[in-house]
Image: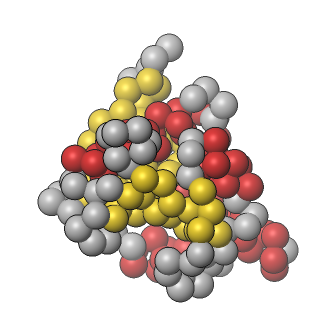
Amino acid sequence: MTWTVGPEPYDSPVAAALWRAYYTEVSDRWYQLYEGHPTDPAELEREIAAQSGADLAPPRGRLLVARYAGEAAGSSGVRLLDGTTAELTRVFLYAGMRGRGGAALLVRAAEDAARALGAERMVLDTRADLVEARTLYARLGYTETEAHNERPYAEHWFAKPLRLDGGS
């Protein structure tokens, strides 16, 4: 079976399904860890709707979808923060697709998209409990940095140069 990664409109049914699965998983994981229950359904719906993904649309962003054997399997997004810095977001694979190399492909495709947008550096944030994500980013050359935002759930921040002269 083979992977493909390509751009996807942020408001497509495929993008919406991936966003719902991603947000449900990370929200439920947090609530289970810290409060012992899944996310309240009303809160889940409110937060999913509040983050449309419009910031992942051209000309300042991209949403990418990975397909495995032609079926949507995961996503990654990139958005410009300024003229030279892009942010990696929404890196996600359905649970059954993990362990097959798709996450690294999604991150690398997002890096290429960021370069195409003019970025020279990629940043991201993640939570302490998302150990798998932190391991992936470190393996792909991201280094932990000082905080670059004040988001409520951000606990670890990473950066990576995207230069084509050996910086990536």
Can residue 14 be seen at all in this image of the molecule? no
Colour theme: secondary structure
With 36 as the anchor, is 168 left or right in this view? left
Where does the image place residue 84, in percent across and percent down from the top left? 28, 64
With 3 as the anchor, is 131 left or right in this view? right
With 29 as the anchor, is 41 left or right in this view? left
Q: Which image quarter: residue 4?
A: top left
Is 4 drawn above or below residue 129 in the view shown?
above
Where does the image place residue 74, in percent across and percent down from the top left? 48, 42
**Residue appearing at x 35%, y 62% in the figure:** 86
**Residue nearer the viewer, 154 or 26:** 154
Is 159 drawn above or below residue 49 in the view shown?
above
Where does the image place residue 39, in percent across and percent down from the top left? 67, 73
**Residue nearer the viewer, 17 or 153:** 153
**Residue appearing at x 59%, y 84% in the figure:** 152
**Residue appearing at x 21%, y 63% in the figure:** 60
Can residue 91 be seen at all in this image of the molecule? yes
Screen quadrant of the C terminus: top left
Where does the image place residue 104, in percent across and percent down from the top left? 53, 37
Total numbered badges shown on the rendered structure: 0
> Outermost residue, front direction?
165
